[in-house]
Image (cartoon, helix red, strand yellow):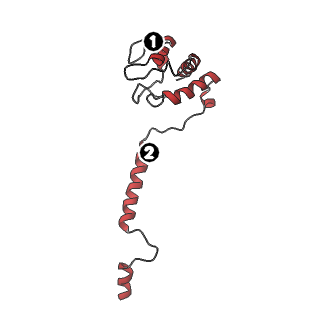
Amino acid sequence: MTMTKLRVTERRPGHKFSRFHLVVGAVVAWLVLGWLAGCDVERRRSDTELGLNPQQAAGRKIYDNYCDRCHRPYSTKGKKGPGLQGMFQHPYLSLTGLSANDDRVGDIIRNGRPDMPGYGQTLSQQEIQDLLAYLHTL
């Protein structure tokens, strides 16, 4: 009878977690899995899978470095700025009402907007052309 009591109340050597810890760990794991399942995480497709030519692939790298933190490329939902999917498929840009063409979008890239920095001093004319070529693929 004493042995049974010892087994119930005494910890075995090397046993570091109580039932409470295991339950808490299971709940946390369940919450993390639920959160991950609800995310819009999609595997990043390669330049080849997207059918990008060398200029468009160069533009994608520029996009990744400068634009991705605020704009989603393959979504109409934005982050800080608007999503850019299908931007050139409409006659006008959604937020500004400006014509959706290379000249107007290039001006925005160079000069910025009230909530967007301009990259005219950062990107060369060729890099802006590469970026525009990539934006046309969205």
Which residue carries the number 2 mark? 37
Compare marks 1 and 2 and give the one earlier in the sequence: 2
The percent coordinates of residue 70 (x first, y second) are 43, 29
Label number found at residue 48: none
| Amino acid marked by disc 1 | Pro
Res 46 → quadrant: top right
On the image, numbered disc 1 is attached to which residue?
A: 91
The answer to whether residue 45 shows anywhere in this view is yes
Q: Callout 2: few (<14), some (14-19), or many (20+) C-alpha neighbours within 10 Å? A: few
Identify the image quadrant of residue 18. bottom left
The kind of secondary structure element at disc 2 is helix
Left-right relation of 19 to 88: left
Residue at image position (56%, 27%) is 60
Question: Mark 1 falls on what kind of element?
Answer: loop
Query: Marks 2 and 1: in contact by CB < 8 Å?
Result: no
Q: Position of residue 50 (x, y in %)?
A: 59, 28
Q: CA distance from mark 1 to mark 2?
A: 36 Å
Left or right, residue 103 beside residue 3: right
